Each structure stands twice: as structure tokens, then as C-alpha cells.
Amino acid sequence: MRIVICGGGVIGASIAYFLSRRGVKPIVVERAGIACAASGKSGGFLARHWCDGTPLQQLARHSFDLHAELAEHGSEAWGYRRVTTYGGVGAATAHTRGGTTPNPIDWVSSHLEVGQQLGSTRDTAQVHPALFTAATMRAAEAHGAELRLGTVTGMRQTAGRVTGVEVDGAVIDADAVIIAMGPWSILAAAWLPLPMIYGVKGHSLVFTTGDTIPPEALFLEFEEAGGAVQSPEFFPRPDGTIYVCAISSDSPLPIDPAAVVPDLGAIERLERICAAASPVLAAAKIVARQACFRPIARDGLPLIGRVPGVEGAYIATGHSVWGILNAPATGEALAELILDGAARTIDLAPFDPGRLRPLDPARLRSRRAASAPLKGS
Ligand SMILES: Cc1cc2nc3c(=O)[nH]c(=O)nc-3n(C[C@H](O)[C@H](O)[C@H](O)COP(=O)(O)OP(=O)(O)OC[C@H]3O[C@@H](n4cnc5c(N)ncnc54)[C@H](O)[C@@H]3O)c2cc1C
């Protein structure tokens, strides 16, 4: 069976990995480089129970367990480790802390209130997302998958079924095609009946801190000097860096993933938040100032499954803030769906792409012809 996966983010790489483990040799077509977008610039935080009580529960729990298995048996290291996770509050204008209990973590400013333990090493963990995605793709290649750099520009269909993918104007023959282009999956709505997919922008910094920060993740509610409240997330990594993200925006998604840049002023705001939140960060060197878009569908749930009405067409996107966590279970379930006709490990019904009204492909094509920008939510 000839399978083409469009997009080399964490979702595309995970699908390639699980397909290749089943003896199929999929081709992954990636426009700008493996993990060049959100899959390389996200936090990489994993939580087993934080989706409990939602339609994501089964996917998240199973994927958390798969992450542990993959890290144990993988031939490479990608920064997987268990972490203790805390919640806290703070403000740019330092208030005197009311309580007498000392903060449980010592790398934050003394005026922050860090009290609530949100997760333990039993149920929260992390990976370095770029390393994880690249290692997953390499493991897929070791099992026969192929990575091709190129831009997916269209799809060939004959009598209601997919027969190929157009890449930079040439066609790669295919019996099955999976759209896994993150927020750029919306481009495929010009060729397939797909619902709206948005891109929500987030900003992040990576600091070099040496080994000063232990495996303690921190979720903060932080009031900036102007009164705006941000929710920065801090993830110290085993490679001696710490990743911090915050400040979402609805800036338009550029068609070229390599053209994503931070919003004006957002990085400076994030730097001020970090300096106020932690004296360690105030003194640390910043090695990356970046932005990326997370993909999200209208109802906030991922789209994983068959594209209705077009045989051989599949989609896996819209994982929003949990794409790194949920990638392995998504890859495994989609491989089962394509090769066995149904997913066995996960019930994909809540993620059926057919649950949402599709856009009109003809309208989208004329909009693109008029060069309208892609808009985030
Ligand atoms: C700031 C931030 C922090 C986050 N933190 C976490 C976290 O801690 N834990 C967690 O689980 N999740 C987190 N996420 C979410 C997670 O990063 C995403 O859900 C996930 O990376 C999406 O992966 P993807 O493969 O669907 O998309 P992407 O990573 O966007 O990959 C899509 C790929 O498709 C390629 N592409 C685009 N157009 C084309 C084309 N025409 N032809 C070929 N290829 C194309 C792109 O170049 C890109 O490589 C975070 C997201 C953000 C924004």
C-alpha cells in the first residue's frame, strides 16, 4: 500500500513511525524541515490525567503511557523525564507574600506564591519536542519510511478516491493520503471536504541555565505591569535549558511555515515576565526567541480519521495544546484505522472529521486565488 503523509510535525512523524512498524513504507512530505513549527517550538509537557472527564481522556492517558514505553525502548534520548508540577501566582508589581510557608521551588522570585502541586512524577513528564519528533522520524526511516522535502500543493482524485498527492507540481502516486500539516491543514480544504482549522499563535523563550533548575514544571498566573494577566508555563529541561511560553495572539498564519515570526513587542513582554518571575532567568542567556501556531478545530477537539466522501483520504490535526502528548496514540490509532479498517487502541469516534460542517472547497480556491491571508481564530 502506497501511503503519503503530508507534514513532518510530531503528528506526521508519529503516524509514519507506527505505519512503518507495521511493515508499510510511507513517504512523509515536509515543506520546511522536520519539527520546524509548533512540534519543535512547544513546551513538550505531558500529563496523564489533565484531560480526564473530556473526550480526550482515553487518548491522553494511552499516549502518556506510550511516551514512557517509547522512551524506555527508543535507541535515542529526547529529554524524556518525569517532573513534579506546580501552580502559582505572581505580578510584575511585587506584593509581599502573605503566608509564612516557603515556596516549594527555589528558582523563582520570593514574591511569587507557588503552592499548589498540580502533578507528581507519577503523572506528569516532559520531552524535548524537537528531539522527540526528529527521533521518531528517524526511527520510522529505520523501518523503511522516507522523508521528502517539498510543498504539498494539491491532491489527485479519480472517481471519489485519492490516487496521488501533488508536490511542487509533480504527482506522487498514493492509495492513501494523510493530511497532518498542523494549522496548514486548512490548505487541504481546497481539495477535500474539511471543516475550518485555525492556527493560534504562541510565543516562547529558551534560556541556558546550566544545571541550576531541577525537574520542576511551573504553571503561573502572572499580572503584567499594565494589568493584563498571562499564563506563562516554565519547563526546565535536562539539557540545561529552560523553556517558557505565554502570550497568545490571533495573528494571521503565513502560508510558508518558515515565515512565522514573533508579534511586535511580544518577546520583550515575555522577557519582562521571566525576569520578574525568576532571578535565575533574569541572569540567564536567552538562546531562542520564537513563535509558533497550534492547530485547533472549531470545537477544540482533534480531527483524526477518514475524510468523509473521499476514499483513501485521512486527516490528523487540531491537537491544540496537547499535540506532543497525544501524538503517539494518534499515530498508533491512525495506522490501525488505515491498515485494519478500524482503530483498536483508541475510540476515534469523538474525533471523527465528519462531525463538523465542511467548508466549500470552491469558495476557498477562489479566496486563495485572490491571495487572502489565512486568518487565525
Ligand atoms: C507555545 C506552544 C506551546 C505548546 N506546548 C505544548 C506542550 O507542552 N505539550 C503538548 O502536548 N503540546 C503543546 N503544544 C501543542 C503542540 O505543539 C501542537 O499541538 C503540535 O506540535 C502540532 O503538531 P502537528 O504535527 O499537528 O503540526 P506542526 O508542528 O505545525 O507540523 C505541521 C508541519 O506541516 C508542514 N507543512 C505545512 N504546509 C505544508 C505543505 N504545504 N507541504 C508540506 N508540509 C507542510 C510544516 O512545515 C510543519 O512541519 C504547544 C503549542 C504551542 C503553540
Image (spheres, grey):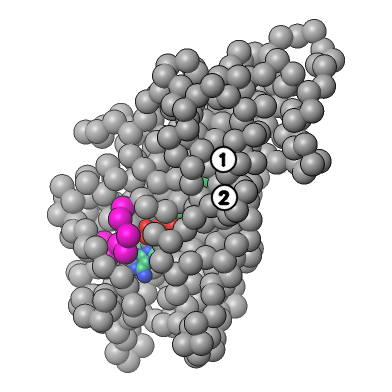
Find residue 187 and report its horizontal and vertical position in percent: 45, 74
Q: Secondary structure at mark 1?
A: strand
Quarter holding the N terminus?
bottom left
Q: How many marks?
A: 2
**Dot label at residue 202:** 2
The answer to whether the residue bearing label 2 lies less than 8 angstroms from the nearest atom of ligand 1 is yes
The answer to whether the residue bearing label 1 lies less than 8 angstroms from the nearest atom of ligand 1 is yes
Residue labelled with disc 1: 245
- Residue lying at 72% horizontally and 22% vertically, measured from the top left: 112
Q: CA distance from mark 1 to mark 2?
A: 7 Å
**Neighbours of disc 1 within 10 Å: few (<14), some (14-19), many (20+):** many
Magenta residues span 28-34
Q: Does residue 86 appear left or right of residue 261 in this picture?
A: right
Quarter holding the C terminus?
bottom right
Q: Is residue 74 above or below residue 21?
A: above
Amino acid under disc 1: Cys
- Residue lying at 41% horizontally and 66% vertically, measured from the top left: 256
